Image (spheres, grey):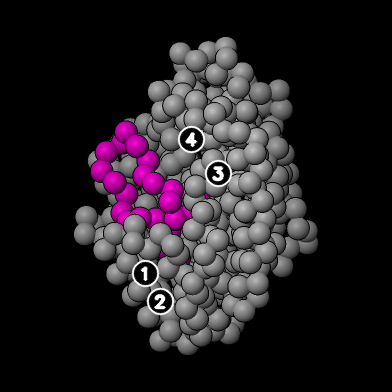
Amino acid sequence: MDNLVSISASEAARRIAKGALSSVAYTEALLARIAEREASVGAWIHIDPSAALAQARAADARPPVGPLHGVAVGLKDIIDTADMPTAYGSPIYAGHRPGKDAPSVAQLRAAGAVILGKTVTAEFATYHPGKTANPHNLAHTPGGSSSGSAAAVADYHVALSLGTQTAGSIIRPASFNGIIGYKPTFDDFNYGGLHALAPSLDTLGVFVRHFEDLSLSRQVMSRSQPVRAPSEPAGAAPRIGVCRTPMWDKADADMQEAFLRTVDRLGKAGASLVDIELPASFTALIEAQTLIFMAEGARHLEREWREQPALLSPELRALLEKGRACSDAAVAEAQALAARCRAELADILREVDALIAPAAIGEAPKGLAATGDPLFSRIWTFLHVPCISYPVGRGAQGLPLGVQAIGAHADDDRLIGTAWWMAEQSAEWTPVI
């Protein structure tokens, strides 16, 4: 494997800016890796090497224009691109060419990025999967719905790729693929130009292999400018809330053991550990988040449901049928519960730098017909707080396991520093060979 494909996006940008590396050479290395692995992994739904190299040559022909100058990145195919098809994981939109880039894509281009291609998404960022396999074991799911973006980063096709999360579509695939997944505070990254599913939940985020690239992504994409994202781990040992969550008994034995081992390592490294038991009101959040997911999904896929139902998967049709049956009163009650719990969580997070919780039930399940359960992300997505998943070992099947750090609303920069410190003390990286 060419070592160029394993460097961070930040390091690639530094080398390109200094003239030590050309964008063309970097892009060619990534394309060679993709040519070697894509037939097995299936991370991409659209990739045009000639167009990518044309962007790279243009980057090399001008001075650096931004912090991602000449660095190739991937985009989940739920994100509009004017120069590439965007099908949203559905045959309904096969060959669809949006009229303009999503704001997030415009931000990447303004920062100098090379848009390498579009990665596989589950249908409308829900549950019906695409072709992608887990690069650690091709018989297992990479998770979803951001399947291709997670697999592309894990398999060294790109160092940074955009994904989205409405339930658990960043944190869970990051855990399954042994990489870092970052779901920002709700609406901190501009979600415009993406096919909406549940607008009160939909969140744009990133997959990377290096923590410094989280800071880079915020520099380019955060609404909270100027960002104060760190360039290194937090300097002092943090105060960490150990949150098994009400779903603890659903985590399998491997995940429970990895989580407790991680907590023990953090304590031995100097972190102050505080056991956190979430208020009783939080137990109803899973059901409430699922209701909002279905109800808003039914509303925002109404046209597709009405005009081309035969081109929707049976799984999605069943979800939309349930969503159409949700009453306005039930939706209002669910949103009111979330508002109350956000206030309660804010009080908890004033006492700690971050919470730690499992990122998934366990390893990536075997088979490609489903993407795994987003159970351990639903609460945090609904509460609009930032989350970062990082790997802490392998389970009995040899596949990665991850934990997630959860921060206070709009305190993403501090969370990055804290999670970086946590990973320095407790991460077990599981690279694809």
Q: Which residue is mark 3?
A: 166
The local secondary structure at tag 1 comes to helix
Q: Earlier in the sequence, mark 3 or mark 2?
A: 3
Q: Quadrant of residue 157?
A: top left
Camera-nearest residue between 61 and 399: 399
The local secondary structure at tag 3 comes to loop
Asked if marks 2 and 1 touch (Cβ < 8 Å), the reply is yes
Q: Earlier in the sequence, mark 2 or mark 4?
A: 4
Does 375 lie within the magenta span?
A: yes
Q: Which residue is mark 4?
A: 126
Q: Earlier in the sequence, mark 3 or mark 1?
A: 3
The local secondary structure at tag 4 comes to loop
Q: Which residue is mark 2?
A: 263
The CA span between labels 4 and 3 is 8 Å
Which of the numbered marks, if any, corresponds to residue 123? none
The amino acid pointed to by label 1 is: Phe
Q: Which residue is mark 1?
A: 259
The amino acid pointed to by label 3 is: Thr
